[in-house]
Image (cartoon, grey):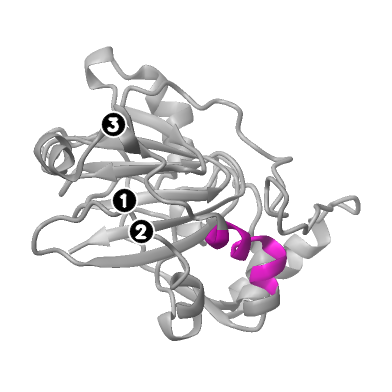
């Protein structure tokens, strides 16, 4: 671990409130992750929502796969995976494992390796609005599948596949106010296991205006309120039991409203 991260860990340890505590009960509603420091504003939801019993795979391909985002409810039952992702269970299994963190700017240049227990205890904190993306550390992707495969084996991915594409998982945990600013890549799904995640999306030919080193929280607080109606994004906040699908090359940014545990299925 580099000296800058060690200094940050020490500073956070000093600043932790003496009363900081949350239950580690695996069956609790928050999985022991705690929802005491959360962002209340979920924004509007202008993305279509479909229940599993109201859509077929063929309808998904024809209406959404190559055209627009959709939120799907009740596609799979990930109760077991959710229990395994409780704070107590993950610390029990992976406390000594190394996880790779990335700076949460559009290009995610810097990578830092830390022990999972150190990340959870010292770096999994609410993110202030005025911090730059290059000064944040975000745990998403860069997972060691050899070490985490037993967990991922229990995840039931969305069953709606795309022709000639194969799934790849990216797992993450993040504090309130964190997120990834606007970027694009191939199609995929995003599911929240604990917490809430707010999504903002634009079609490929409508690139949003944003600074690549400003955080999503900064964009939501400073830029979003001033957008004309015709420049507003598609958006919605997803919760456990909901899966958001985004098509190829759609611009998107995310904002975690609570301490959130989440997994994405990238199709490529």
The residue carrying pointer 2 sits among few (fewer than 14), some (14 to 19) or many (20 or more) residues within 10 Å by Cα, namely many
**Which secondary structure type mostly characterizes the magenta part of the structure?**
helix
Residue 78: x, y in percent?
49, 55
What residue is pinned by disc 2?
Answer: 157
Can you tell which of label 3 and label 2 is closer to the viewer? 3
Give whichever of discs 3 and 2 has the lower sequence position.
Answer: 3
Residue occupying the point 43% across, 74% down:
143
Residue occupying the point 59% across, 44% down:
176
Can you tell which of label 3 and label 1 is closer to the viewer? 3
Q: Is residue 251 visible?
A: yes
* Mark 3 → mark 2, Cα distance in angstroms: 18 Å
Quarter of the image where the N terminus is located = bottom right
Q: Is residue 209 visible?
A: no
The residue carrying pointer 1 sits among few (fewer than 14), some (14 to 19) or many (20 or more) residues within 10 Å by Cα, namely many
Give whichever of discs 3 and 1 has the lower sequence position.
Answer: 3
Q: Secondary structure at mark 1?
A: strand
* Mark 2 → mark 1, Cα distance in angstroms: 9 Å
Q: Quadrant of residue 66?
A: top left
Q: Secondary structure at mark 2?
A: loop
Measured along the vertical axis of the image, is residue 87 above or below residue 217?
below
What residue is pinned by disc 3?
Answer: 54
Quarter of the image where the C terminus is located = bottom left
User: Label for residue 189?
Assistant: 1
Magenta-colored span = 80-91
Q: Is residue 252 magenta?
A: no
Callouts 2 and 1 close, C-beta under 8 Å: yes
């Amino acid at each position: 671990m580099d000296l800058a991260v060690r200094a940050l860990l020490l500073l956070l340890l000093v600043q932790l409130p003496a009363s900081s505590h949350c239950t580690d009960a695996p069956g609790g509603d928050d999985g022991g992750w705690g929802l005491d420091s959360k962002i209340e504003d979920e924004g509007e939801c202008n993305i279509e929502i479909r229940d599993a019993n109201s859509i077929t795979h063929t309808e998904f391909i024809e209406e959404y796969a190559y055209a627009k985002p959709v939120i799907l409810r009740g596609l799979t039952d990930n109760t077991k995976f959710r229990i395994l992702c409780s704070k107590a269970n993950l610390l029990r299994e992976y406390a000594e494992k190394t996880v790779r963190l990335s700076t949460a700017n559009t290009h995610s240049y810097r990578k830092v390796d830390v022990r999972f227990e150190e990340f959870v205890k010292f770096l999994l904190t609410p993110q202030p609005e005025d911090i730059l993306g290059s000064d944040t550390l975000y745990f998403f992707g860069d997972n060691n599948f050899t070490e985490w495969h037993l967990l991922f084996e229990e995840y039931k991915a969305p069953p709606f596949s795309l022709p000639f594409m194969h799934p790849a998982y990216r797992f993450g945990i993040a504090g309130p106010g964190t997120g990834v600013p606007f970027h694009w890549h191939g199609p995929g799904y995003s599911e929240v296991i604990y917490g809430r995640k707010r999504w903002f999306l634009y079609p490929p030919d409508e690139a949003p205006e944003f600074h690549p080193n400003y955080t999503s929280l900064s964009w939501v607080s400073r830029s979003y309120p001033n957008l004309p109606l015709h420049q507003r994004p598609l958006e919605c906040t997803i919760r456990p039991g909901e899966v958001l699908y985004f098509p190829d090359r759609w611009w998107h940014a995310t904002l975690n409203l609570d301490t959130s545990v989440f997994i994405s299925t990238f199709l490529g």
